Structure formats: C-alpha cells, structure tokens
Image (tube, rainbow, N blue to C red):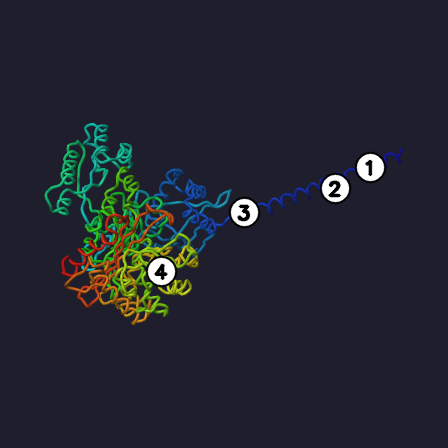
Amino acid sequence: MRSRRAGRRRNKRAGKERAWKILAALAGIAGLSAGAFLIVRWRQEAALPKPPELLGAYMACIPEKAYDRMYGMLDLEQSGNISQADFVARNSAIYEGVEAKNFEVRVLEYEEERGVVTYETSFDTAAGPVSFENEAYFTKGEEGYRLAWGDYLIFPGLEAGDKVRVSTVMAERGEILDRNGKVLAGKGTASSVGIVPGKLADRETAVQALSELLELEPEAIEKKLSAGWVKEDSFVPVKTIPKVDDIEYLIPLEPDEEVEREKERHEQLLEIPGVMITDAEVRTYPFEEAAAHLTGYVQNVTAEDLEEHAGEGYTANSVIGRVGMEGLFEKELKGQNGCRIYIADPEGQEKEELANRAVVHGQDVRLTVDAYLQKALYEQFQEDKSCSVAMNPSTGEVLALVSTPSYDSNDFILGLSTGKWTALNEDEDQPLYNRFRQVWCPGSSFKPVTAAIGLDSGTIDPEEDYGQEGLRWQKDASWGSYYVTTLHTYDPVILENALIYSDNIYFAKAALKIGPGKLKDALLRLGFGEEVPFEIRMQKSSYSNTEEIGTEIQLADSGYGQGQILVNPLHLACIYTAFGNGGSVVKPTLVYQEEGAVSCWLPGAFSEETADRVLEGLKKVVNDPHGTGYGAHLDALTLAGKTGTAEIKDSKEDTSGTELGWFAVFSAEPTERPLLIVSMVEDVKDRGGSGYVVKKDREVLADWFAGND
C-alpha cells in the first residue's frame, strides 16, 4: 500500500513539474511574440516616409498637376478641413495661372520633435523665376506623417481670401518696312463688331442677322455669347471687319461698289439692337495683294500653336506669323510680353509683388525691297500667272519679289469666310501659290549661261560660223524624228548673232561641243543642286531629273534652256549679275544694311573676258532692232538682257502644250539706280510669247530709271 501511495505522490509531483514547464514555455512564447511585435512595429514606422521625403513627394506632384494626390497627404483637421474640390481649385488656379514649372526644392533643416521642415524652393513663372524660403509643418499619426496645409505653402505671404494676380502687358509687334521706311506690315485700325447681351431685344433674331451680315455660322456666335466670362453688360467681340474710313483712305478714288457695300453693312449692323462697333488695333498690310507673297500674314494662335511653342511667351491672345516675312522673322517681330505676378488682398489691394518681367516690344525688320517697285511690277502682271525678281546687280540687294495672282493679307487678319477660303483654294490660277520660290523651265533666258560655260571651257569659239541649217536641225539620223527648231535665219551664225536672234540650233550645237560632263560640272559650280544663300528658301535649280545628262538630245535641248533644265528665278537673276560684275555672282540679300559690304556668292564664276563678251551680246539683244528684247529699248540708258520662251509639253509629239515667257534685263552702264529684273509669265502662247513680258517690264524700267515712284 505504502508503495502505491508513494508512486501516486511521485506522479503528482511529476505532473506539477510538467505543468510548470508548460506554463514556463507558454510564458516564454508570449514574451517572444511581444518582442517580435515591437520589432515589426518599429520597422514599419522606420519604413514610413519622413517629413522631408514627404515634402519632396508633395512638391513633385505640382508639375504633374496631381492635386488629388497632394490632397491625400494632408492632415485635414490641421488643414482647416478644406474640401478636396476647394483644395484642387485653389492650387490649380494659382500654379497653372502663373505657369509654374521647373520646380526645385532643397531641404535646409528638419526639426523632428516639432515636425517642421525648413526648405527653399524655386520655379519659373510667366513673369520670370520665383524663389523663397518656407516652413512646412507635419503631424504624426498612426498612418505616419501628414502635412498641415495652408495657403502660405503656395507663397509665404498668401492668406485665405487673397488672390494671386497675373497682369500682362502685350508686346507691340515690330513693323516690316521697305528700304525707305515705307510700312509693308504694321499697326492699323479695324472695326470690331460685338454684342452686349443685356441690350439684345431678341437674341435669336439678332444672332441670325449677324450670321448673315458677317458670314458666320449662328452656332459660332452663340458659342462666343455662352463663354464663362460673359455678363449682361459685357462687350462680346464677334468679328473684326474693315473700317470704312480706312477703305476710303486706301482707295482715294470715286467711291466704288466695295466701299459702298461696306458702308451699308456697317449701317445694317448698327440697326440690330444690342450690336456695337468699336475700333480695334490690328495688323495691317498697306500694299495689300502687291506684297502678300513677300510679307505673308499673321493669325491668332491656335491650341496647337500654344502646345508647339510652349514656354515661348505666347498666350491665347497672341498672333503668330504664318508665312512670308511674318513667319521668317517671327522671333524678332513678336517681342516678349511684360508680366507681373502679385498677391492682392480680398479688397483687391496689392500686398506683395512676386515677379516682374518688363515688356520687350518686337523689333522692326527693314528689308532691301523698294515698295513702289514691288507695286509697279505687281500692277503690270496682276492679271497673269507670273513671278518677278528685281535686284541691284551690283550689291545683290533684292528690290522686289512678286507673285501673281495674289491675295490680300488683310483678309487673313479680319477673318476669311468659309466661302472666300474655299474660293482661294479652288481657284485654278492658284493665288496662294508662291511662284517666285519655285523652279521653272528657263527656255532661251538660259542661253547666256551656255555661252559663258562654252567660252570659259574653250569649247566655243565666238567667231566660228556654225553655218546655215534652216529652221530645223538634227545631228544625224540617230535622232530619228526629233529636230531642234528655231524661228529666224541670219548670217553669219556666230555667238553674238545667235544671242541677238535667240537661235536654238546654235546653242544645241554649242551644248554638244561642251559635252555632258563639262556642262554638268559647270552648272554645279554655278549653284545648281544647292540652295541659294538667301533668307527665303527657294527651290533648288536642277540640270537633270537624274544625276547625269543622259542623252545627246537631252544635252542639245539643255543648251537652249529646255530638256530637263529647271531654274529658280532668283538664282537666274544672281547668275546674270556676273555679266555686269566681271564674272562674279553676287550673294542676294533681303535685310537692309546702311553700309553693307557687297558679298559674293560665287566669285570668279566666269572669267572677266567671258563676262564682257556675253555682256556685249546681251546689250545687242535689247538695243539692236533685230534683237528679241528690242521692245525694252530705252534711249536714255543702255540695257542688256535676254528673252526666253519655254515650251511645256507632255511629250515631244505634244502640240497643245503651253509656253512660259521670260525676260531678264539689267542696266549695263553706271547709273544711280542699278536694276536687274527677271520676270516669268505662264501661258504666253498666242499672246506674244516673251514679247508679252518685254512690253510689261519696259514700263517698269522706264519709270524706275526716270526716278518715278
């Protein structure tokens, strides 16, 4: 019995010991779990962003316009319980209103106990750079740090109720002037037609009447009236139209139908209750169609323009040059708007200026062009499809660049109706097409170039008589049915006479003597295949559709400016300067300089002897009664030049093709007003050929050398 009791006591003690061990083990496990929990919690807190990092993340959201993400970082209670909508509206209006970008943030100090980050920030605005020191306050909660937001975080001096104002001073666009200071593009006044909504008697009727008188869709007018800024007493501009007084000034003649129609339209507009007409400053082009292809025009910027030219100072109210000089010199002409950014209190009083950039008005651009010569050439050719280049052959100054038919740049400022825009684009004469920038078949106006190349290469003897061939010729039977034709016979068949009578056969033979390789190399040296060094980009002249002059027939045709020869009119004018400058080709210029040095593009393009020999022939073209350019002869001054009639055919067999008429002419003796003109007219077949061009250029030459403007 004693042994059984002793066994039970031993078992009981062993059970107690096991229980204590289990409890001890459980207690150990609990202790380890608590420690692990504390470690994990510490690690989680350590992984949370600290205030300096959080501030950086907050600021990085501004250029991304991620205002919702910024709002998610706030301690709302410490931020005045601002709503998300109000927060987004406040921040977006200010940052985007001042055009803030290129943010940089540098932490200067972090006081962990107070949760204060002292930092320096800088960014660019529409008025220039802004930088300041500031403090950001953070609170610590269960989910980490939160930003205590206030208006001061945008700008230190900004308080609730204050506004950040942006004041813009528009830069005046520079003027485009001719060499004598005449305005080609500048400031003008037009009539701005608008509506005062509160004075409309019947909105629907008024809008319909306006749409008919202004050639606008009613929906376009309604859209303007529905803009967010419009109030009952607002003047809502609808369209800019010509000012009647200006029309009368520009047309100092008896009142014509256009003036009377415009007067009547003004009267009808003012009869509509709620419609007002005020003066508006606009870009104006006094020489209208005469200089349109030269000056180009400006238009209001589009959303695409603002995106493409972001950061260049354009606003929704800006204009931008589209083509011509307006586009070429856009950076110089546009200037830079002035801008002030300041904080205003709730009463509108200025508290603090944040940035200020002074206005810089656009520069005037003065051209070498003579406006009256430009107009004179336009008036002679305005009914034709043509182009003319005029320059001073001694200095290279370009005096006129004309393309006809033309358009009125002023129409683009006032706003083209859909009908007028369609008419311009669908006009078969292509008034929007700039012809002086293109390349054309030069015909016989190219013969002096062939002559000079032949003389310089030694392949042409100017006294060699090529013999009579009649009015058509081919080298041999290998040419099949193809013949070179000419219009006149004469004797002897030497270089000078070939120029006077414009003999195609002579220059076809001359080209064969020169050979394809020498002709190609010489033309490359004369700038074929490269851009003319000029402010306006011209199409490159070319000698062939391939890299070589491939056949004898193509070579022969090239000699008299046919085949595949294509020349830009300005390029041809430059080459002609060599005949009066001892063989050097001057560089053309368009920007006026008071005492600009003459710059050569191709010095020594021809030898002086060659230039003089060709010049003598060109003088006789204009001054010999047999010369094809005799119609331009002036008793008071010796001129030199060359006519050209280029056939434009679909094939060699084509008998219905058109003709281009050319005349290149220049003063061949010293004069106070040196002048070289190259004119090209399309479709001169059955209108006198090149003689049609000669007659018109003579009128311009006579006035110019008589000193008439």
Query: Answer yes or no: do the residues labelled 2 and 1 have beta carbons within 8 Å?
Result: no
Task: Nearest to the eye among marks 3 and 2: give it.
Answer: 3
Give the alpha-carbon distance from disc 4 to disc 3, as whole Å.
94 Å
Label 4: state its secondary structure.
Answer: helix
Looking at the rendered structure, the secondary structure element under dot 2 is helix
Q: Where does label 1 land, which residue?
A: 11
- Residue holding disc 3: 45
Q: Is residue 218 above or below residue 427?
A: above
Q: Amino acid at mark 1?
A: Asn
Residue 62, compared with residue 85, is above or below; it is below
Image mark for residue 232: none
> Can you tell which quarter of the image residue 595 is in?
bottom left
- The label shown at residue 508 is 4
Q: Which residue is mark 2?
A: 21
Q: Earlier in the sequence, mark 4 or mark 3?
A: 3
Residue 91 sits in which quadrant? Answer: top left
